[in-house]
Image (spheres, grey):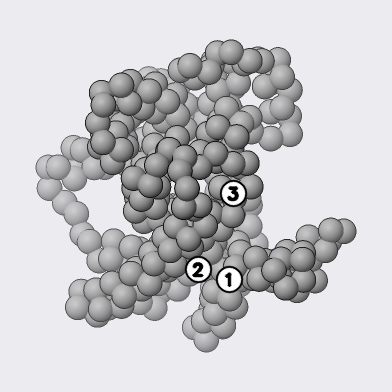
Amino acid sequence: MVILVHACEPFYLGGEGTYIANSYDAFWVTIFDSALRCAVPLFIMTSSYLLFPLKMDTASFFRRRLVRVVVPLAVWSLLYAIIPMWGCGEGFDVLANLRNLLLNFNMHSGHLWFVYMLIGVYILMPLLSPWIEKVSKRGEQIFIAAWAFTTLVPFLNQAALSLLTRAEVYGVANWNEFGTLYYISGFIGYVVLAHYIRTYVDWSWRKTIAVATPMWVVGYAIAALWFWKQIPTEYPVNQSIDLAVLMEQSWRFCSTGVAMTAIAVFLVFKKINCSGWFYNKVVLPVSKVSYGMYLMHMFALVAILSYVSTWGLATPWTMVISTALTYVVCAVVALVISKLPFGKYIVG
């Protein structure tokens, strides 16, 4: 899902910041990307489902996260800083890239923002574990309901901008970013939500589908319709990045539509049990190196997408085929690396 999201980006990002060649590209970006933005919340929910509350002491938990998450992040951050991606050699400044790593990820490796956020979630897990073990079902429901309201913030910001000519809400100001909703918002809501689903949601397939299907449809509609409505009607669209930021408000990972699609997908996946040869020989090994695939995939995708784009295929096929080829290449490379004595420090 993440790879396909990134395969869609060249079809609406570019030029002055936002570039859409025609309505056909706009349509397929909207169709695909609106369904895929739940990928990040799903990863957080899966991590919570498997790790939260902590089943080991805090020191052991952090040691394992250091080896599996932080060290590979450092390795690939350095690689992206010193090796230009396909077609990106001009203006590539290795020394500047290395200097930037002291404070943040480089724009050449923008997808690594996710790992910084994930580390923050992991830091909070030991602090939240005692609470989650003691809080009642009603207490969790109240927290989740409050968090669900915070998923409206991207839209409330736009409403405030229209009504008040400034986007801040509920105490946020240019001298204070910590408003009323700050401490109950963000990705930590997915951590609590996944624990609640694991602990209290044990539905039949029939009830799961009955709940998940309309939830996904409504969430998808919110994500897609907002994005589509912000696109100008005259093509090609070539405007500043501010337009893309506005278009993506409904794609924010902690926004209402994306949260609804993530919950719906998670409820369905929770019901699936796997076994047999394909699971043990393909799914499980690839799953074990999937973090490494994520870390490396931009190196492969940029080159493969550039190559596939010369085939003259329709936009959706360019996106899907580039994604599939990237997935296979990264899976093979990550599996090979994992067999090396030091492989765990590279692919996690």
- Whether residue 37 is visible, yes or no, is yes
Residue 97 rendering spot, x and y as whole percentages: 67, 22
Which residue was labeled with disc 3?
A: 243
Which residue was labeled with disc 2?
A: 256
Q: Quadrant of residue 155?
A: bottom right
The answer to the question of whether label 3 and label 1 lie on touching residues, with beta carbons closer than 8 A, is no
Q: Reading the chain from its start, which is encountered first: label 3 or label 2?
A: 3
Graded by Cα atoms within 10 Å as few (under 14), some (14 to 19) or many (20 or more), the crowding at tag 2 reads many
Helix or strand or loop: what does disc 1 sit on?
A: loop
Mark toward the viewer: 3 or 2: 3
For the residues labelled 3 and 2, the Cα–Cα distance comes to 20 Å
Amino acid carrying label 3: it is Leu
- Is residue 81 placed above or below 9 in the rendered structure? above
Residue 51 rendering spot, x and y as whole percentages: 47, 56
Q: Residue furthest right?
A: 175
Graded by Cα atoms within 10 Å as few (under 14), some (14 to 19) or many (20 or more), the crowding at tag 3 reads some
For the residues labelled 3 and 1, the Cα–Cα distance comes to 20 Å
Amino acid carrying label 1: it is Leu
The answer to the question of whether label 2 and label 1 lie on touching residues, with beta carbons closer than 8 A, is yes
Label of residue 152 in the image: 1
